[in-house]
Structure formats: structure tokens, C-alpha cells
Amino acid sequence: MAMQGEAAPLIQHFQLQENQSCFASALPFRCFQKQVGDLQLNLLTSGTDRVHGVDNIGCEPATLMAQQAIDKLNPDLLISAGTAGGFATKGAQIGTLYVSEKYVVFHDRIVPLPKFDNAAIGCYPTLDVSQLAADLKLESGVISSGSSLEKNPKDQRIIEQYNAVAKEMEAAAIAWVASLYKTPFFALKSITNLVDERNQSEDEFIKNFDYSVTVLNSTLIDLVHYLQGKTINSLGRQL
Ligand code: ADE
């Protein structure tokens, strides 16, 4: 999770303990852990920007944190959980929860050169969690990542082309690392703002953050219980 505020309710609920020696001291990432039933739960957050004091959101910290997560913790499953912008035309409301389906793309890497074009979009695979989505009553669809919160018509063109249901700032970066290491991956995103309505994404994000995070965390708690006793194979196949 990129933001400490996204993770705080889960840390509180499961009384996760911070492991301060998980990462090299130069790295800002934080790791909160606990054995919950038969799951070793490791919740990582990106830490804060050394200069500005805000959460390290975005693809660069997400890439490095995912690599560190796999290197230090060797997880069976990597989940990118957090908030996202959604689309009223696709049926989203504030607090709608989406799991990733098919693949995860980048919407702001436009390289009009043969083969570089598709490589830039990514289309990194996601675990097929359609059964999980049905069991936990979650929506599903393509998740799209980029480096801006602000609306941008160029981003929107790619989002529409790939029929993405949610727009956020980390999932594709994490999915790329997961694909390198062949670590099963999926994303779970809670909608804070409706990108296709007349509003400023940043205003809506702030206004709806607490509600969206409450819904996200309640589903994450359900998910931790749902995963008990399950293997990756019984969950789904990485596409
Ligand atoms: N996170 C939450 N809403 C977002 C948006 N509209 N764009 C990017 N990241 C987001």
C-alpha cells in the first residue's frame, strides 16, 4: 500500500507489529507483520518523502518496494491494495471495490514506435481471482496506472482503449516486478473519485478518502479470512 492512511485500519485491526529491520536503512519503506491463522501477513507501506514529508505515492517507490518485498519476504502472493479513480459510466460509485482482471496497464507511457508502444502499456498479468471476486462480491476489471492524479485527456484515451475500470498510481509498477519474478499478483482498489463526472479528482479524493479506505479495509479483513487454508492454485491461475 502506498499511503500510511490506507493501511492504518488494517494495522490496527490485526495489531500488526512493525519490523524495523526488514529493509536497508536508506529505504523509506515500512513493514508491518503478523502470523494470522495460516497466513504470514506482511503489510508494506511506502514511507514518506524525505524532503516533503508526504507518502511516497507513485510508480517509482512502488517498483522498488515490490522488488524489496519479493527479495526480503519471498511472498506466495503480492497484492497492490489502495485507492483509485473510477468511472460512473462503468457503474462505479464512491467506495466501489475492484479486483484486477486479465492484466494491468500503464496509461501515460505513450511511445509510438513499433513494439515499444505495447511494451510501454505493459499489460502485465494478474492472477485470475474471478472466484474470489464472486465470493467477496467485488467488481473486477482492468486496472490502469500512471503518475498523475489530475485528469488528463491523453490518459483517458488509453484508459478507454484498454477498457480500464480504475485509474491509480502503483498497480502496473508492482505487476511488472511480480511478472519478472513470476510472483502471483493481483490488485484491489477502492474508488475515491469519479473521473468522468464534472469535478476535480484531487478535491474528490480528499473528500472521499476516509470512506473509501474504510470500505477497502473492511474487505481486506474479509480477504485475510478468505485466504485461510487456500493455495495459489485453488485461488486462480496467473494469466
Ligand atoms: N487515486 C485515487 N484517485 C485517483 C485518480 N483519479 N488518479 C490517480 N490516482 C488516484
Image (cartoon, grey):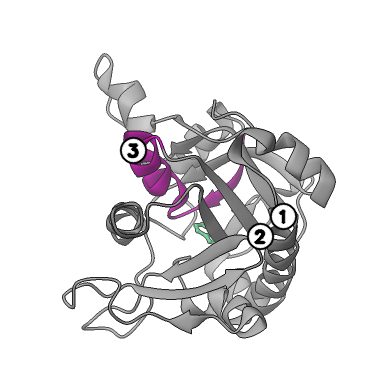
Please check the rendered image and state whether residue 174 is part of the magenta-colored stretch, yes or no. Answer: yes
Mark 1 to mark 2: distance in Å?
A: 5 Å
Q: Does the residue labelled 1 lie within 8 Å of ligand 1?
A: no
State the residue position of label 3. Answer: 181
Q: Tell me, for residue 97, which label it has, or none.
A: 1
How crowded pointer 1 is (Cα within 10 Å; few <14, some 14-19, many 20+) is rated as many
State the residue position of label 2. Answer: 190
Q: Position of residue 77 (x, y in %)?
A: 51, 48
Q: Residue at x 58, y 57 (%)?
A: 84
Q: What stretch is highlighted in magenta?
A: 164-182
Identify the mark nearer the N-term, 1 or 2.
1
Q: Which residue is drawn at 62% across and 55% down?
A: 189
Q: Which residue is drawn at 27% across and 75% down?
A: 28
Mark 1 in CB contact with mark 2 (< 8 angstroms): yes
Mark 2 to mark 3: distance in Å?
A: 26 Å
Specify the quadrant of the image occupied by residue 59. bottom left
Q: Position of residue 236 (x, y in %)?
A: 65, 33
In the rendered structure, which amino acid carries the disc numbered 2? Answer: Ser
